[in-house]
Image (cartoon, rainbow, N blue to C red):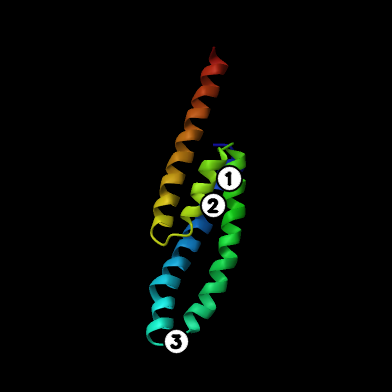
Amino acid sequence: MDASVSGALTRYRIIAIVVSVGLVVLFGIGVPLNHLAHISIVSAIVGPLHGFLYMVFLVLTFDLARRLDWPYGRMLVVMLCGTIPVVSFVAEHVTTKRVRADIAARTEAAEHAATA
């Protein structure tokens, strides 16, 4: 795997997991506490932090997508999956698996072309 793509994938995976955990904490703990017990400290801290990290997630997803020449639709779907609490974990796993398969196919095609 190309070092730049490998680095982009690693950055994507880290931020995707961090954003996913933040989203679960926000919607699983913060929002219920805020609405049921009128305790807003979790939402007040995690909400803005998650918003900032989601913007970082968008930038890093865009970076990965451009390095791999993804179609815009695929990139947007991956970006939107970061807004749904549990789906975001699944999207990270599926995206990582697909990127690794794409890289393997490209490497195999390049090796085949070099030997031909």
| Residue at 43% in and 87% down | 38
Foreground label between 2 and 3: 3
- The three-letter code of the residue at mark 1 reads Leu
What is the secondary structure assignment of the residue under circle 1?
A: helix
Pick whichever of labels 2 and 1 is earlier in the sequence: 2
Q: In this view, does 15 lie to the left or right of 86?
A: right
Q: Position of residue 55 (x, y in %)?
A: 60, 60
What is the secondary structure assignment of the residue under circle 3?
A: loop
* Cα separation between marks 2 and 1: 7 Å
Foreground label between 3 and 1: 3
* Cα separation between marks 2 and 3: 33 Å
Disc marking residue 77? none
Q: Where is residue 54 in the image (x, y as percent from the top left)?
A: 56, 61
- Residue 7: tell me if it is visible: no
Q: Label 3, on which residue?
A: 39
| Residue at 51% in and 23% down | 109
Pick whichever of labels 2 and 3 is earlier in the sequence: 2
- Residue 6: tell me if it is visible: yes
| Residue at 45% in and 35% down | 101
Disc marking residue 12? 2
Corner quadrant of residue 87: bottom left
